[in-house]
Amino acid sequence: MNQLNRWISRAFATTFFLILTSGLAQAAPAASSPESLKGLTWLQAQVQTTGTLANEPLSIATPLQDRSEALQTLKLLAAPPTALADLLAVDTEINTEYLARRAATLGRVVDQL
């Protein structure tokens, strides 16, 4: 039985590794396309030194929605801006959506450190 458990553990670990690496391999070409790099550059330029986003008042989304989505995208494609993460962390609005957004976004930033 012990040998069966080891085999199952190895099979699970191998499967997990293959899924993870195939996902990373698929994401890499998209991030290096000229259009993606142009979009990344634009998004990086939207982050102000205070952590807010340029033209935030004109968005139909709430500031927290804008910031969390921008931070998630930047975290996946580049180094996440500290000011943006800090501003999300100090937001005091308490509702299910905002708590979930902060947990998902800031959890990923913490994992990156």
Image (spheres, grey):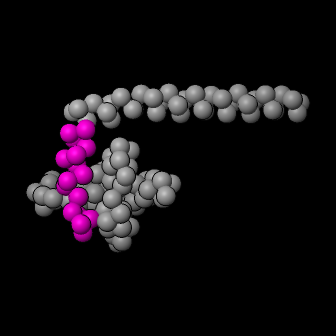
Q: For the magenta stretch, what is the residue range? A: 37-52
Q: Is the magenta stretch mostly helix, strand or loop?
A: helix
In the rendered structure, the answer to whether residue 96 lies left or right of residue 61 reads right
Residue 97 visible in this rendered orientation of the protein:
no
Tell me where residue 11 sits by quadrant: top right
Q: Nearer the viewer, residue 74 or 89?
A: 74
Q: Which residue is drawn at 46% across and 33% down?
A: 24
Q: Which residue lies furthest to the left in this view?
A: 58
Q: Nearer the viewer, residue 80 or 13?
A: 80
Is residue 51 found inside the magenta-colored segment of the image? yes
Q: Which residue is drawn at 36% across and 28% down?
A: 29
In the rendered structure, the answer to whether residue 73 lies left or right of residue 56 reads right
Depicted 50 relative to depicted 41: above or below = below
Is residue 45 found inside the magenta-colored segment of the image? yes
Q: Which residue is drawn at 58% across and 28% down?
A: 18
Q: How many numbered marks are there?
A: 0
Q: Which residue is drawn at 19% across and 55% down?
A: 46
Tell me where residue 36 sits by quadrant: top left
Residue 106 screen position, x and y as percent: 42, 59
Quadrant of the drawing holding the N terminus:
top right
Residue 91 screen position, x and y as percent: 33, 69
Q: Nearer the viewer, residue 106 or 77?
A: 77
Residue 26 screen position, x and y as percent: 42, 27
Q: Residue furthest right?
A: 1
In the rendered structure, the answer to whether residue 35 lies left or right of residue 69 reads left
Residue 31 screen position, x and y as percent: 33, 35
Residue 84 visible in this rendered orientation of the protein:
yes
Depicted 62 relative to depicted 40: above or below = below
Depicted 31 relative to depicted 57: above or below = above
